[in-house]
Image: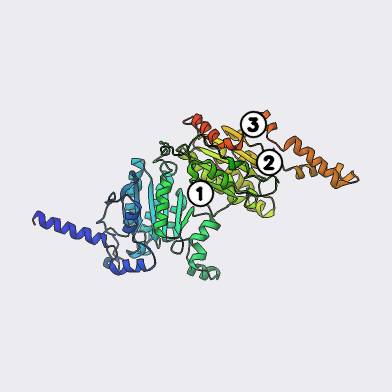
Amino acid sequence: MTMQDKLSRLAKMEKQARAGGGEKRVQKQHAKGKLTARERIDLLLDAGSFEELDPFITHRSTDFGLEKEQYLGDAVVAGFGKIEGRAVFIYAQDFTVLGGTISEVSAQKACKVIDLAMKKGAPVIAIWDSGGARIQEGVMSLHGVGEILLRNTLCSGIIPQLSVVMGPSAGGAVYSPAITDFVFMVQGTSQMYITGPDVVKAVISIDISHEELGGAKTHAEKSGVAHFIADSEPDCLQSVRRLLSFLPQNYRELPPAVAPSDDPDRKDESLLNIIPDEPNKVYDMKQIITSVVDNGDFMEVHQSFAPNLITGLARLDGKVAGIVAQQPAYMAGIIDINASVKGARFVRFCDAFNIPLVSFVDVPGFMPGPKEEQGGIIRHGAKFIYAYAEATVPKVTVITRKAYGGAYIVMSSKHLRGDINYAWPTAEIAVMGPEGAVNIIYRETIAKAKDGDTTRQQLVSEYKERFAHPYLAAARGYIDGVIDPRQTRPRLIRALGTLEQSHVTRHQKKHGNIPL
């Protein structure tokens, strides 16, 4: 056989590998509004940068008719490439090949990519479109899923891991996205569930659709599994590229800085008018965030889940910062179970990858009531406390209005190793709100008074004058400065610049025991 013959054979095999499950199955994929694995990779990565690994591998099973269903590359496309010139590793399940099911060899391909990502110190992206473990392979497919889960766990906190769910993700396979740092889903075509609607109906006699059970909206709003949702696959992949622009390659690096394009000394007059004079009126904390960060560019994370707490990424003077803030416009910004878990996870991610934290505080407390208490608000709230206390990245806090009780403590206060803590003149720092405090402290006085309501109002006014301001905390050194709201951006930039690359000594231990 001549060299030309050998090259012709190679070209034929490459074409066969690129064909996936064949044209009919590709058309079926397109008819559902879904791209193929290779189309997704081409859209996500920089043009021409993808280098494929193991395109000629095939599954090893000869049971249940699988000897007639062998495809080059099996049910996953894997390799490496670049996004905005930075290295990434990627594997994408190919639904046109046996429903994208996970076999021993397709898992082997995925594991090879993850291992290389760890070795290089670069992010790994998984695109999920799969019916789960391949039933015909039995325990070998389960072995493959377990190997992926092990690597997801060992990689955690070392390299960023992103999961992009663009079709079904069922059974044990859903736990791989759940372990990774961020999960993206697409409206109408993405589903994640342990068992599908048919099994749910058979076991507990409930009729439910795929979308209701495990669709993008369900996981973005209710379960909190999905951090980002998009209306289309191209939009979803563009969001992946945008998120990576804020993230370092690994835990040893700082997040990527860009040339500043917004004046670091910029003052915003509108900040004087955002907080209402009436203490119980709502406002939108996102107005403050977008006014302060570079060019108003804020990428919110978990936008639809626990909207009483805002988390996301932005830049200040070209450098990345993680933003955590209450949202007074939703449930008054109170901290409930979902907000606790959301905040703790985001804070720990930022700490793992050297992203400094900026916290904007307007919090009336933790959510009271039997539903929250019985649901474990103590345990879940402790996660949030643990995350902030454990974090060693620079932490700068701005109290805009209320900061009451334990919720004041959790929000990166000095008492949990907050580095620089500012307050606006509108800030109120106390164990609880004036009305509640007066009702407890002066219960007997109010009860004995001839005009209880008038007495109560006088006592509330006295309490406000004494406690409902930031200067008592500033006098104790718990607040480093009471600042003009218009100065927030320059003060944050100077604080973060001073704290950059600071080090915190940790006790040697295997790991702490976060109250999971």
Tag 3 near tag 1, CB within 8 Å: no
Q: Position of residue 118 (x, y in %)?
A: 36, 42
Above or below, 270 relative to 415: below
Q: Which residue is mark 1?
A: 300
Q: Which residue is mark 2?
A: 405
Q: Please name the residue shown 53% across and 71% down the image.
A: 207
Q: Position of residue 424 (x, y in %)?
A: 63, 37
Tag 1 near tag 2, CB within 8 Å: no
- Compare marks 3 and 1 and give the one earlier in the sequence: 1
Q: Residues within 10 Å of mark 3 (few under 14, many from 20)?
A: some
Foreground mark, 1 or 2, reads 1
> How far apart are the two marked residues, 1 and 2, measured between alpha carbons?
27 Å
Residue 516 can be seen in this image: no
Q: Quadrant of residue 206?
A: bottom right
Q: Residues within 10 Å of mark 2 (few under 14, many from 20)?
A: some
Foreground mark, 3 or 1, reads 1
Looking at the rendered structure, the secondary structure element under dot 3 is: loop
Residue flagged by tag 3: what amino acid is it? Tyr
- Compare marks 1 and 2 and give the one earlier in the sequence: 1
Q: Quadrant of the N terminus?
A: bottom left
Q: Which residue is mark 3?
A: 478
- Compare marks 2 and 3 and give the one earlier in the sequence: 2
Residue flagged by tag 2: what amino acid is it? Gly
Looking at the rendered structure, the secondary structure element under dot 1 is: strand
Instruction: Looking at the picture, tell me which residue is in the foreground, 171 or 486.
Output: 486
Looking at the rendered structure, the secondary structure element under dot 2 is: helix
Q: Which mark is residue 337?
A: none
